[in-house]
Structure formats: C-alpha cells, structure tokens
Image (cartoon, rainbow, N blue to C red):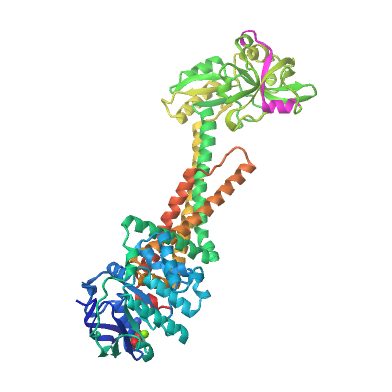
Amino acid sequence: MALIELVGVARHYQHGDIDVPALDGISLAIEAGEYVAIVGQSGSGKSTLMNVLGCLDNPTHGSFHIGGQDASQLRADELAALRRERFGFIFQRYHLLPHLDARANAALPAVYAGLGANARSKRAEALLTRLGLADRLHHRPNALSGGQQQRVSIARALMNGGQIILADEPTGALDSASGAEMLRLLGELNDKGHTIILVTHDPSVAAHARRVIELKDGRVLKDSGTPAHHSLPADAPQELAGTAQTGGLRRLQVQWREAVLTAWQALRGNRLRTALSMLGISIGIASVVSILALTDAARGSIEKDVRGFLSGRIPVWRGNPALPPGAVARSFRPAELDAIRALPGVKDVNVVRELQLTARHRARDAGVTAIGSDAQSLAARKLKLVEGRYFNALDQAGSAQVVVIDDKARKSLFKSGQPALGQTLLLTPSGLAAEVPGQPAAAGAALPMTVIGVVEPDGGGISLNFSGGQVLLPLSTFARKLDPRLDTDSFNVMLDFSVPPARVREQVIHRLKALHGVEDFDSWNAEEEFQKIQNVTAAMAALFAGVGAIALLVGGVGVMNIMLVSVTERTREIGIRMAVGARQGDVRLQFLIEAVVLCCLGGLVGVGLSWLGAQGINAVQTQLKVQVSWTALAVAFAVSSAVGLLFGTLPARRAAALSPVEALARE
Ligand code: ADP
Ligand code: MG
C-alpha cells in the first residue's frame, strides 16, 4: 500500500442551505519519498486537500489511509498523534508564535512529543544551524525576514521527523531569492527521503516537483502519476531517530512545564489585564485569609487568656446600678455564702479579699486594688513574678507587712528607672470600706508596707483590672490590718457544671434576693459573656466569609471572561499548536493552568494584603495578635486553585474543542 491513499474523498462545506463541495471525489496514491506539486486555480480545493492530507480536517466522504491506517476512522487525539509523528507543515504565512524566539518556535512540536527542554533546544539549534540561522536563535519572528521565518518553519516541520512535509504556497509570501532558496531546501529534503507535498498556483514552482496533480472544482483534472523510476527511500528519514516517543510520565512533566511557562508568558504579556482580573480573587482570598487569622487571634486571646482565667466561676459583688440613689448595698454574710454553697451546681464559694485603697510612695499616690493573696493567687490571676520574690510561709504566718505590686502600680507610684524593691508604700484604706456604716475597720490609719516583688500579666492576656494597679498582700495581713470583717463585698461562685451556668446564676440571684430583700448586688456570668463574644466573632467571620465568597465568585467570573477573550485572541496559536501535534487535552491543560496560575497569583496578592492588614492591626493595638498562618496560606492556595479550575474549565474546553483548520484560518 502507498504511504498516502485517498479513495473517493469529498469535503463539503455548508454555506447556509447551499452545499459547497470543496473536494468532490478525489482518488490518488502517493508513495513515500515522492515530491508532489498540487496545482490549480484559486478556489479549486488545493488547501482543502492539503488539510485533509495533513489530518487537520476530516473528509465528509471517502476513505483516507496513511501508512496503512484508516485516518477517516481516527479520533481527534489519534489524528493529533499522526500529525505529530508523520507530518511537518509549512504555511504560506509561516504561522510562527510571535512571543517565542526562533529556537522555541522550531522546538514546539517536540513539546507535544514529550522531549525534555534540553534535548529540544539542542535539536532545534542543530536544525536552525543547518538552515543557516545559527545567529538568529533568539530572535522573535518579527525580528526575522520572511525567508528566515520560513526557514524557522522548516526547522519546526523537521523537529519531530517530518516524514511528510506539507507546504501550502511556501513561496507565496517570499521574494524571488528567498523563494528559490526555499525550493532548494525542499529539494534537498526530498533527496534525504522526505515526502514533499507542495501546493502552488505558480507553474515555475511546480516545475521543481517530480509529479504534478492539477485540481479543478474539487476534482483531479490531471495527475502525472508516480514517476516510473521512483524508488522508495531505504529508510525512514534520519530525523525520525532523535524523537522516539517518550514515556507517559515524562511527557506529562514536559507538558506541565510548557503549560506553566506559556501561561506565565501570556499573563506577563498582558500585565494590566492580568492585574485587573486578579483583583476579585485577591479580595476574596484576602477575606478568606483574614477570617482565618482573625478567628485564630480571637480564639487565642479570648479562649486561652480570658476564658481560662474566668471560666468556671460567676463573680458576684455588692452594689447594683439599678438601686435607687442613696440606697446602701449590704455585704454578704458568712451564713448567706453557706446558703449559696448549698445550691445545686455550686462547687464552692470563694470569698474575694479585695479592697480599693490609696497607695502612696513619697509624693506620688494612686488608687489601687489591695488583694489578700495566698500561694494560688498568682496562678489564679495569671500573673508572673518578674522581680524580687513572692510571699513565703513566714510572711503568711506572721502577717508580715510586705507587698507584691504589679507593673501598673509600679508605674503609677515610681518614677521610671527608680527601683521599687525594698521601698516602703503607705496604704490608706479609702472608698468602700470606710463608707460602710458600722465597719470603721482600719479606716484612716496609713499602713507602711515593704515592696518585695513585682509581677506582670502572664502571656500578654487582657488585664481585667481597671484601677491604678494591683497590690498583693499576704491573706493574713489583709485580714488583720485592712479588713477584719467576716462579711465580704464580693465572692466567686465556683461551678461544678452539673447544672448549666446560666441556671446556677439565676438561682444565686434568686436566693440572694430573698436573703437581702432587694437586688443590691450584681453578677457576671463569664460563660454567657463568652458566648456573646463568640457570637460576635462568628458574625464577623460570617460577614468576611460572605464578602470572600462574593469576591471569589465575581473574581472567578472575571477570570473566566478574560480567559474566554484570551482563547478568542489566541485561536491561531491554538491552531498552530494543534497542527504541530498538540492533543485536545494539551490545549485544555494549557488554558486550565493559565486560569489556575492567574488565580494563584491573585491569591498570593490576597495573602499579601491580609498580611499587611495583620501587621497594621498588630501595630495599633496589643490585645489581639493577628498572624497569617501557614494553614491560611495553604487554604488560600487551595481555594485559588479550585476557583481557577472551576472557572477555567469552560474557556479551556472551548479552546480544546476548536477544529485545527478553522483555528488556523482565523485571523
Ligand atoms: P484553494 O486553496 O485552491 O484556493 P480552497 O481549498 O481554499 O481552495 O477552497 C475550495 C472551495 O471551498 C472554495 O470554493 C472555498 O470557497 C470553499 N471553502 C474553503 N474553506 C471553506 C470554509 N471554511 N467554509 C466554507 N467554504 C470553504
Ligand atoms: Mg489555498
């Protein structure tokens, strides 16, 4: 069987209702190694025949065998494989990719054959050097003359072997010298065993061929036939050797690299457009990352510091803003506390030994909270010792007149740089204790206290103390010197969680109200408050999530739009890639990757934005430490990729569905 065999091949075009037979029953056989010119008037069907021969187009009728394979029965990817392995195309208008240099243009077919980048470049350089373009390897097509561009396209045709070279009017756009050179090269290739099929309307060009087929109205008018002395080439052309098909995995790797690189070039070539279409994605990703960072930070500060500090108890204190003016709130008696202790869900009742008083050091004074403290107080109040020492057993037993102050009290009482340890403070009971009738206690007497230590809030937690600072004294000192009353002004109800905290609080309020006759006290349920804070956090997260989702949707649609435009703009590029052997999957992959790269770039900018935002938030306040975590980065990457895949699918499918001939013909 001949290399190429057509029997009754027809190709009809549909012009509305009119059926145009561009090819109308063509039968011919071409042997390997022939040099055939196809001639005929314009519109006689030469290009259509060429496209069918080159597996760019399918005949509507008839059978078409190539190398013994029935090409009319092949699917798109199998046709692509035939183009890749057997054909090399040379077009009248070169059809080089404008953004690639000569070497990359020549090397293009090998990308789809799965040849590695180095091997590809080497082979392209060798071919271009043989064609006299050694000093033009890195010129782009617009920096090359027509003859040079046509030689690049010869190199491209030979890249994968080019057993059969199809040239449609190869000299049509060249000056006579370049045209002659072109014909000399084609003759040389034929001598080496390549089968050359050339389309021309120029008899002087056709004269170079060894066989002339003349078409008229889609039929063969004249065919000089295979020359009688024609001998088959001994071997496949030598060029085939270098491009043995590579394994699937390697091919995939090569394809990915090419697709990512092409995507990058395409995006770089359109910087403004790229930036604008990235915007929506950036905002969306910034929102998503911010949600994660903020929820993390909120959880960190609220749940770790405050919750650990206050959870499991309900503070109750004397006084209520709802009391009529002038009404005096009563303290809580030990018997009342016992009644609370007996309530279900209450583990214990801890009396808070605290007093607001005035501390004085030399000429400075400040309102501070004096706290009767035992060994657990530091941990319970989330304080850590930064200077000096804490109370020991001796201090407790002997009611020693020593204090440990926090950094806030230190700032209000000491000049900066002035040592606090060993200094004496004068504590003057004031405020509440002195005002309570029948509780004269230690009112008026200033107590000298020696500072033995300084504490600071541990772990940067939120300080819930709003006075001028905290002054800790041994519990025994507090009871003996400051507040000997058995009654207390505030206490903590410790929960055992057998009853919901809100229910316990209700009961405590109910019981105390019954005992006091009026609600002259107030309480605070940490659990409820945290629930509120969490609701606020959740609402904020939902808001951000909503903004993020909408931005991502809008951004995704924007990306899809831009990609569709890009497919339209680059239709010819797609045609060229398909002509040199790209599968539909390759084209799809290329555009899909471009969409994903675009979205991931947008995502990266989004992550950058939220990082900047986090730095801003951290700079203006210290209570919330916002950090963009690696998890957030991973989520951003995953979401961007997903958006790219989702919204890139339609453009990619559209690109892959293009027919090679139509894509090539599009201007
Ligand atoms: P040639 O290359 O010999 O000038 P063509 O093969 O390009 O001729 O065209 C042959 C006939 O088919 C012409 O009548 C042309 O109008 C028609 N034709 C070619 N391509 C198309 C197409 N894509 N759609 C409709 N008609 C076409
Ligand atoms: Mg034509």
Residue 305 vertical position relative to residue 613 in the rendered view, above or below: above
Magenta residues, as a range? 396-414
- Is residue 647 at least partly visible in the picture? no
In the picture, measured across the screen, residue 386 lies left or right of residue 340, that is right
Please name the residue shown 48% across and 68% down the image: 100
Quarter of the picture holding the C terminus: bottom left
Please name the residue shown 71% across and 15% down the image: 449
Residue 410: x %, y % from top left = 71, 25
Any magenta on residue 273?
A: no
Residue 453: x %, y % from top left = 66, 19
Q: How many marks?
A: 0
Residue 359 vertical position relative to residue 141 in the rendered view, above or below: above
Residue 415 vertical position relative to residue 261 in the rendered view, above or below: above
360 or 404: nearer the eye? 404
Residue 236: x %, y % from top left = 28, 70
219 or 610: nearer the eye? 219
